[in-house]
Amino acid sequence: MFRDRHEAGRKLGIELEKLRLHQPVVLALPRGGVPVAAEVAKALKAPLDLIIVRKVDAPGNPELAIAAMVDGDPPGVVLNREIIEAYSLDDDALRVLIAKERPELERRRLAYRGTHPPLSIAGKTAIIVDDGVATGTTMKFAIRALKRRSPREIVVAVPVSPQDTVADLAREADRVVCLSQPGQFRALGYHYLSFPQLSDNEVIAAMDEAVQSRKAGGHRNQKRASGAARETTTLNRREK
């Protein structure tokens, strides 16, 4: 059991550090995945971004997703062909259902990301982070959408998930890192001592903090490089 999402993220970051991943980019599934991903990004000294997924439910059955829209430039649509065929949905019906969910995807994109485009993951390691995975449906849609952006590899990183879901995700992603795989999963909140629902404002604040921290780190690195360059110049002059 984890104390809270921040503790889970720190523990997850320790495990991911051991993998020595190539140019990692941490992608949080909001809302719950954001504080976990923020700690992972700190541990890996990696950029943090969001991957915003909006599921498109089957007619009259919110438990089944026929598709999902994933924020991007342009937004990606990932189809669940098996469910679409089971409901005998033609292209027109599918377009109507997808169009209904587009405003909410746009609302979340503007709220969380504003005008900033998604970070490029081409040739890099994309690490998708959430605070836990139950069925894995949303995570699968995220993985399939990211594959279109040409990453070097895709890593799923979560604190807790059922064993069968981890095995299922391992067939979709290049690697899955999961700290706890309980035999009896129950609800996600049972695996945390503190598991509050996060608001949009908390997500925005966490992302702003991560961006400022990243910028501050970049400024420190520039100062170190500048200082090293001055020392080298001084030594060269002395040698002459």
Image: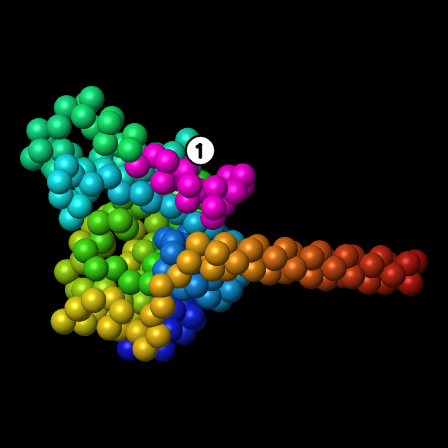
Quadrant of the rendering where the C terminus is positioned: bottom right
Horizontally, residue 222 falls left or right of residue 61, namely right
The mark total stands at: 1
Of the pair 149 and 215, the residue shown nearer to us: 215
Expressed as whole percent of the image width and height from the top left, the position of residue 155 reads 34, 54
The amino acid pointed to by label 1 is: Asp
Q: Nearer the viewer, residue 5 or 225?
A: 5
Q: How is the image coloured?
A: rainbow
Q: Which residues are magenta?
A: 101-118
Q: Residue at x 30, y 46 (%)?
A: 143
**Is 170 one of the magenta-colored residues?**
no
Who is closer to the viewer here, 122 or 82?
82
Magenta-drawn stretch, dominant element (helix, strand or loop): helix
Q: Position of residue 207 (x, y in %)?
A: 51, 55
- Which residue appears at 41% of the width and 31% of the height? 74
The image shows residue 12, relative to residue 47, as above or below, that is below
Task: State which quadrant residue 193 falls in.
Answer: bottom left
At 46% from the left edge and 66% from the top edge, which residue is drawn? 39
Secondary element at image label 1: loop
Q: Position of residue 87 (x, y in %)?
A: 9, 33
Query: Which quarter shows the N terminus?
Result: bottom left
Residue 29 place in picture, x, y as percent: 37, 53
- Viewer can see residue 221: no
Q: Residue beneath label 1, please? A: 73
